[in-house]
Amino acid sequence: MSDDGLPRELRIVVRPYASSIPLGFFSFGIGMLLLGGQANGWLPASDQHTIGILLAAFVFPLEAVAMIFALLARDTFSATGFGLFSTSWLTVGLTDLAAAPETTSRAVGLYLLGFSAAIGVLAVAAFAGKPLVGAILGCATARGVLDGAYQFGAPHPLYAASGWIAIAIFAAAVYGGLAFLLEDERKQTVLPVFRRGSSKQALEGGLADQLRKVGDEAGVRQAL
């Protein structure tokens, strides 16, 4: 062993994977912008089918790509978030395509409430390392709950409120995408993303810190 705790003979294979977080954030933000415009009245009801096509054809595949590369990069948290949202965009898009404008569905409402519960759990977990991501996921949870309640028959102002939350999420997601993009390009924090704990150590720690628990990671250990 060397003085820094690493084996004297160490081979590192660098995989040509870029960070998928900026792609995921930007596409996520655009999806939220569309949902916000739909809910707060910026877009007419007649645009519902067009919105469905955009969510399914643009947002879904980009989020899916972000999920795949997050998995390959061993970022379980990001892969889980992008995975849940990617198929959610496809689901919402197909639902908009199939439904008549300005109609509600209890099935969609129940789905949104269940989805929001899962995202809420991710939001709580995110605050331990990436508070910015946690705040965005927390807002997405609130948006989903309001939309789900509207699908169950709650007053329309709740749906409009979910739209304005979506607009706020769009702004935060664009900021987050730019911040993580600059961070990855320059290998240092340019715009604050408020990393802390293991997330901060992953960026600022040395190679020994990165390898200390590699034997316990999925794909290396014998069982998931």
Image (tube, helix red, strand yellow):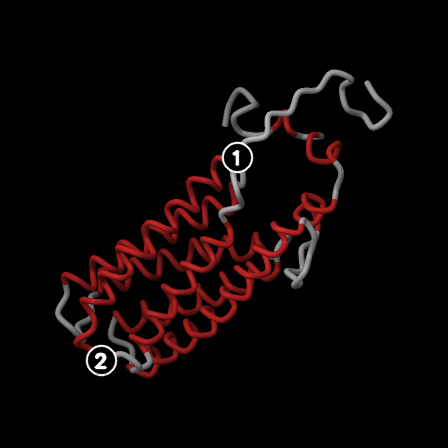
User: Does 124 appear above or below 152?
Assistant: above
How far across and down, in percent of the image, does residue 41 sit? 29, 82
Image disc number at residue 155: none
User: Does 190 appear above or below 75?
Assistant: below
Which residue is the site of mark 1? 16
Q: Residues within 10 Å of mark 2 (few under 14, many from 20)?
A: few
How far across and down, in percent of the image, does residue 124 sit? 55, 56
- Residue 17 or residue 96, whichever sits in front: 17
Residue beneath the point at 71% across and 30% down:
212
How far across and down, in percent of the image, does residue 83 sit? 40, 46
Residue beneath the point at 27% across and 62% down:
54
The N terminus sits in image quarter = top right
Q: Mark 1 to mark 2: distance in Å?
A: 44 Å
Q: Residues within 10 Å of mark 1 (few under 14, many from 20)?
A: few
- SS at mark 1 in the image: loop
Q: Residue 186 vs residue 97: left or right?
A: right
On the image, which quarter does residue 43 sit in?
bottom left
Q: Residue 3 vs residue 185: left or right?
A: right
Q: Residue 85 vs residue 78: left or right?
A: left
- Residue 111 or residue 210, whichever sits in front: 210
- Residue 177 or residue 130, whichever sits in front: 177
How far across and down, in percent of the image, does residue 156 sit? 28, 81
Which residue is the site of mark 2? 44
Q: Residue 209 vs residue 132: left or right?
A: right
Q: Which callout, 1 or 2, points to the residue nearer the camera? A: 1
Kind of residue indicated by mark 2: Pro
- SS at mark 2 in the image: loop
- Residue 152 or residue 6, whichever sits in front: 6
Residue beneath the point at 27% across and 64% down:
109
Kind of residue indicated by mark 1: Pro
User: Does 100 appear above or below 94?
Assistant: below
